[in-house]
Amino acid sequence: VIYKLYVRPGGHHLLIGGNQGDNWYVHLARSLKPRPVPMSKGPRVESVCWDRDGADEVSTGEFLVGTSTGTMCKALIADGKDRYWKVVYSLQDSAQPICGIEYELFPPSGRHVIEGIRKYFVMAATPTRYYEFIGGPTYDALFEQYSAAPNFVELPGDLDYTELEFFRKGSGRATSFVWLTGPGIYSGSLSFGSQNAGDSVTFDYKLIPYSTKGGNSGGYQVPVGLVSSEFHWIALFEDRVQAVNRLTQQTVWEHAFTQQQVYGDMIGMCRDAGTGKCWIYSGFLVNEVLVTAEDQNIWRCYLSMGKYDTALLYCQTLEQRERVLTAQADHYYQEGQWELAATIYAKTHRSFEEVTLGFITLGEKGALKRYLSDKLDNIRGTDRTQLTMICTWLCEMYLDKLNSVKGG
């Protein structure tokens, strides 16, 4: 009986996991006939982590496999034959299944650049723990360092499954991860520097409790699937799918499957690593979840967080930019950073009289001069009246300054 399917990005290689530990391989570009993988006979395959760089049409490249008994294997299939399938790590104090594996390469530095040595970061997840592994240059050497002292984070729960996914934009390096746990969605950021075995790459952790809608006896439902896009988590439940904003942790979209006889109970979801497309499936059908213009309100999220410079990067209209700049200037003004406020106000359409009167009332001549000078740079050449007024005012201020210096 087929348990799970694992397709390598690119679509050439397919690993079919059997319910009893038997596995088959299909080269999708050559033949649709499954071939058994004898060396893999054993615990059921729960997760696969494909190498993004080492594969071609003939070979899968070396990849990692997580099993139902808490072991990790490295494997390679080429020319339709299993070249090797070897256990490289076993969870010592946990017999839980390894349901998710992800990896990333550290940026090359020092001798790694000259010698072309790989330094790996591997994260593996069970329903209640995630493990971090740092090292290289091979998987054997990497996991050998953790044979006695595993590095893990634990969140107790009663789930018997989980999801783990890295998010990377395009072909770039992974920047964040998301982990489906019993208590909620656990997420964090990834930073690759000079870390070594025993260190952590993860930081800025968050645990977002699940929605209480349609809850079970515990008051909430746990998703059956979870994937990440650039700004949202997409969570699949048996009866609905919803998108949660990663910045605000608020549900921003939800679709309920009201026709159970058509949809059936949802089983899982996956994201195409190459195209970023997201798919959900039940026993009856497969549907694509379309993610379009997901960044259209991200400027507003960053604005509410006080991250003005980042908010400006996501503004799509002049009106949005005006709102962000005005809020930033008001913030600096309230904090007493007058000259910074003046510089930003000069880029906005805030009333000229209101801004100048505010600085005059405060006696902040330096901020007033900064505002007038920057405003002069931003005014259109056709607005001659305001140009003349500002130039005259600035000249008076500079003359006043010169007179005060002479008088001193």
Image (cartoon, grey):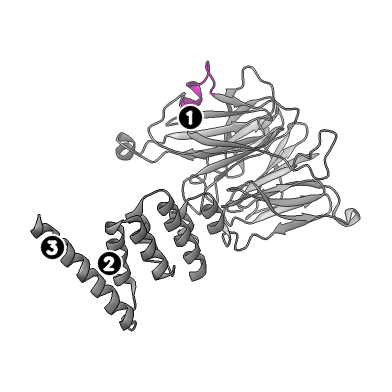
Q: Amino acid at mark 3?
A: Leu
Is residue 147 shown in magenta?
A: yes
> Position of 50 compared to 53: left or right?
right
Q: Nearer the viewer, residue 230 or 52?
A: 230
CA–CA distance in space, label 1 to label 2: 49 Å
Q: Amino acid at mark 2?
A: Ser
Q: Nearer the viewer, residue 379 or 282?
A: 379
The residue at the point 39 percent across, 69 percent down is 353
Query: Quick one: label 3, few (<14), some, or many (20+) residues within 10 Å?
Result: few
CA–CA distance in space, label 3 to label 2: 17 Å
The range drawn in magenta is 138-151
Residue 19: % across, % down:
78, 35
Residue 171: % across, % down:
48, 52
Question: Closer to the camera: disc 1 or disc 2?
Answer: 2
Residue 215: % across, % down:
82, 40
CA–CA distance in space, label 1 to label 3: 59 Å
Q: Amino acid at mark 1?
A: Ser
Please indicate, yes or no, whether residue 39 appears anywhere in the rendered image. Answer: no
Q: As displayed, is residue 318 above or below residue 359?
A: below
Residue 288: % across, % down:
71, 58
Q: Which residue is mark 1?
A: 200
Identify the image quadrant of the C terminus. Answer: bottom left
Q: Which residue is mark 2?
A: 373
> Position of 140 compared to 268: left or right?
left
Disc 1, SS: loop
The residue at the point 39 percent across, 41 percent down is 107
Q: Which residue is mark 3?
A: 402
Is residue 228 shown in magenta?
A: no
**Earlier sequence position, callout 1 versus callout 2:** 1
The residue at the point 60 percent across, 36 percent down is 101
**Earlier sequence position, callout 3 versus callout 2:** 2
Question: Closer to the camera: disc 1 or disc 3?
Answer: 3
